[in-house]
Amino acid sequence: MPRISYEEAQAKYLMWNEAEDAIATGSSYSIADRSLTRADMDTVLMMKRKYGRIVDAYENGGKRRSRTAGFYPVDR
């Protein structure tokens, strides 16, 4: 399990989600001493993905969901 608590990870995920919404509408967003603009959207999405994975790990008991829905071999 990650070293951050579920509540902390969820709070950070929500914070980065708010930043994404603010930047998407054209305004800037400030976190601590850093101001983020539209050009920083890659950073925001990366951090949102990071904390989203931590929240998912807590909610799924540390088990990752399979990315493959099904695999059907085709003989050619």
Image (tube, helix red, strand yellow):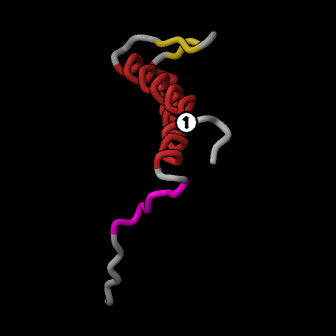
At label 1, which amino acid type do we have?
Tyr
Q: Position of residue 36 (x, y in %)?
A: 52, 16
Residue 67 is one of the magenta-drawn residues: yes
Q: Nearer the viewer, residue 43 or 39?
A: 43
Residue at label 1? 6
Q: Nearer the viewer, residue 3 or 51?
A: 3
Residue drawn at point x = 56 percent, y = 15 percent: 31
In this view, 50 is above or below 63 = above
- Look at the image and tell me in which quarter the C terminus lies: bottom left
Q: Nearer the viewer, residue 11 or 34?
A: 11
Residue 6 lies left or right of residue 38; in this view the side is right
Tell me if mark 1 has few (under 14), some (14-19) or many (20+) residues whose alpha carbon lies within 10 angstroms of its own: some
Residue drawn at point x = 48 percent, y = 13 percent: 29
State the extent of the magenta-drawn residues as a range.
62-69
Q: Position of residue 16 (x, y in %)?
A: 48, 25
Residue drawn at point x = 42 percent, y = 61 percent: 67
Residue 29 lies left or right of residue 22; in this view the side is right
In this view, 8 is above or below 28 = below
